[in-house]
Image: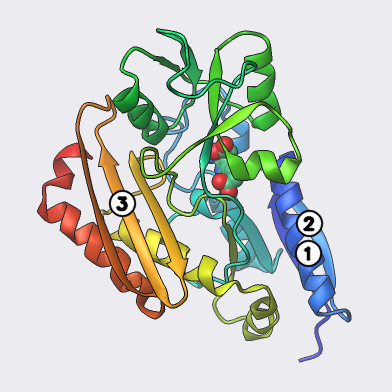
Amino acid sequence: MNRRVVRVGTRKSPLALRQSRWVMDRLAAAWPELACVEVPMVTEGDRVLDQPLDQAGGRGLFVAEMEEALLRGDIDLAVHSMKDLPIDLATGLTLGPVPLRADPRDVLVSREGWTLEELPYGARVGTGSPRRRAQLLAHRPDLQVVALRGNLETRLRKLEEGQAEALVLAAAGLDRMGYGAERVPLEPPAFLPAVGQGALGLELRAGDAWLLDRLAALRDPAAEAATRAERAFLHALGGGCHLPIAAWSEVRGDRLHLLGRVVRTDGARRLEGEEEGSADAAEDVGRRLGEGLLASGARALL
Ligand SMILES: NCc1[nH]cc(CCC(=O)O)c1CC(=O)O
């Protein structure tokens, strides 16, 4: 089929635009005859800024409108942060190849460049994520976790204004935006990131073999195996992105190692485990770990 134009849907936040342009540049470099058109969209998650995300409507807040646009044919490709992408996509849509992943870790950002241990007693740490909250409190029960919403710029401004002593953010977002904020990584295994953090999710119509073929040029096999394992882990736990579930996977050669954790939101209880297997069977590794944690009583924490 003689198609040349790919309409790429993206949220309008600076980070989302940065991500979709990165994908468009890579596609254009691999397929010079192909033209990408950016289609910025405002999603429900961008409109509801005054409530914590888990109360504002749960899963798929940033995704539903983009899925509808894909199914209508208004766009051909949706670029998401993998960690915002629900496990179950709308019928008729599929997850494409996974490109090279950015740093999956969380970082602690403060004006002083404090580590988690160095934060003053009772310091306010900004995050709306139950997973981050639970892991912060597990290490530092004295901390005051405060919900600071908004995009990266807004949160960094609130830190600057003194609304908190520190923030927890994804390293990937700061890196992609080129922000040089003072930060220290929250290192695994002590602190684990969200499933899919740092990776991009490329969503397209399941029947669009032409586009799937072209997206294959962007595939990073290690990133794909790691994110498949992490998402299968989350799926086995019946989870969504706003539950206190964390995972960390590493691919070395053809082996994949996965660490998973379920934490009670007050940080006082946790369950964790690890699994290893062939990177070719990444989803089996994730499913085994999820089922193992369920067998150990994970449901009581969720
Ligand atoms: N929850 C919002 C969100 N979705 C993706 C990222 C960062 C980039 C990524 O993880 O891929 C962020 C910001 C953050 O958590 O600090």
Between residue 242 and residue 165, name the one nearer to us.
165
- If you read the primary sequence from the N terminus, does the residue marked by circle 1 or circle 3 appear first? 1
Query: Badges 1 and 2: C-beta atoms under 8 Å apart?
Result: yes
Q: Position of residue 293 (x, y in %)?
A: 18, 53
Secondary structure found at label 3: strand
Q: Position of residue 23 (x, y in %)?
A: 73, 63
Secondary structure found at label 1: helix
How packed mark 2 is, by other alpha carbons closer than 10 Å (few <14, some 14-19, many 20 or more), is some
Q: How many marks?
A: 3
Which label belongs to residue 24? 1
With respect to residue 68, does 269 lie above or below? above
User: Please, what is the three-letter code of the amino acid marked with disc 1?
Assistant: Met
User: Please, what is the three-letter code of the amino acid marked with disc 2?
Assistant: Arg
- If you read the primary sequence from the N terminus, does the residue marked by circle 2 or circle 3 appear first? 2
Which label belongs to residue 239? none
Which label belongs to residue 260? 3
Q: Is residue 134 left or right of residue 251?
A: left
With respect to residue 269, does 237 lie above or below? below
- Residue at the spot 41% in from the left edge and 45% down from the top edge: 241
Residue under label 2, please give it: 21
With respect to residue 114, does 5 lie above or below? below
- Residue at the spot 17% in from the left edge and 45% down from the top edge: 299
With respect to residue 225, does 120 lie above or below? above
Q: Is residue 237 left or right of residue 179?
A: left
User: Which residue is outermost to the bottom?
Assistant: 1
Q: Position of residue 154 (x, y in %)?
A: 68, 24
Between residue 97 and residue 273, name the one nearer to us.
273
